[in-house]
Amino acid sequence: GENVEQHPSTLSVQEGDSAVIKCTYSDSASNYFPWYKQELGKRPQLIIDIRSNVGEKKDQRIAVTLNKTAKHFSLHITETQPEDSAVYFCAAEGGSARQLTFGSGTQLTVLP
Amino acid sequence: KAGVTQTPRYLIKTRGQQVTLSCSPISGHRSVSWYQQTPGQGLQFLFEYFSETQRNKGNFPGRFSGRQFSNSRSEMNVSTLELGDSALYLCASSQTPGLSYNEQFFGPGTRLTVL
């Protein structure tokens, strides 16, 4: 089955700096890669996703890049703010069952 | 549209007991997936139901089971509870699996504590 690895597990940045979280996946048939943000005590919420026919997607301060050849994708957050502090999960959907497999999460802390 | 709801939100049980958790998906969503979330383990997939049938299953023991009703509401059951079953159990609904891009919407979760 699919295996998704996510790095780093924790990340601290100064407010205004950029943050990058990286994920690799194993199933070359995977074709959908969402990112979820989970604030403390809350449910995971989709913040951005990318399809396999696209190399990059941006939404204001958030961007995701996908390299299908290398089987990795990354989340980029620019001009970080304290409210960006949360756990971020990457996921990959693939295989015949089209099941979502999640990475282990990254705790992002934005220091004021 | 109302979001995904889960009941109960908190539950305390003792070892050996069994527990049933409930999930109501977004109206019109026919697929419900269940995940176990523990510190450091991320979101571990339990199973997915669609049209009252289990469509996918993760690597969990047979003590974990589920079902889906005709109105798409789903329940999961854990029998013979163990201390290690303490976790946040999340369900997520999506419109129809098998179509491209299976966007999932999560419920608030049920926090299960096993003493």
Image (cartoon, coloured by chain):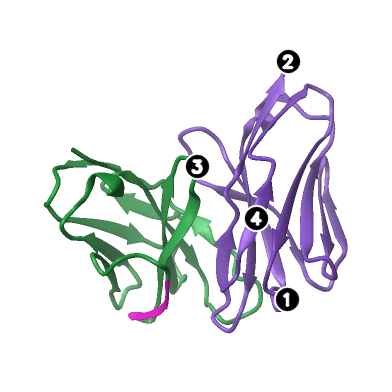
Chain colours: A purple, B green
Chain letter, disc 3 residue: B
Q: Position of residue A105 (x, y in %)?
A: 59, 45
Q: 10 Å neighbourhood of mark 1: few (<14), some, or many (≥20)?
A: few
Q: Can you tell which of label 1 and label 2 is closer to the viewer? A: 1
Which residue is found at the position 15% from the left and 57% from the top? B80
**Are marks 1 and 2 in one subunit?**
yes
In the picture of the structure, the residue carrying the numbered disc 3 is B40
In the picture of the structure, the residue carrying the numbered disc 2 is A112
Q: Position of residue A29 (x, y in %)?
A: 70, 79
Measure the C-alpha gap from mark 3 to mark 2: 26 Å
Element carrying mark 4: strand
Which residue is found at the position 71% from the left and 24% from the top? A110
Cβ atoms at labels 4 and 3 below 8 Å apart: no
Q: What amino acid does circle 4 point to?
A: Glu
Which residue is more in the foreground, B75 or B70? B75
**Span of residues in magenta:** B52-57
Residue A19 forms part of the magenta stretch: no
Cβ atoms at labels 1 and 2 below 8 Å apart: no
Toward the top, the furthest residue is A112
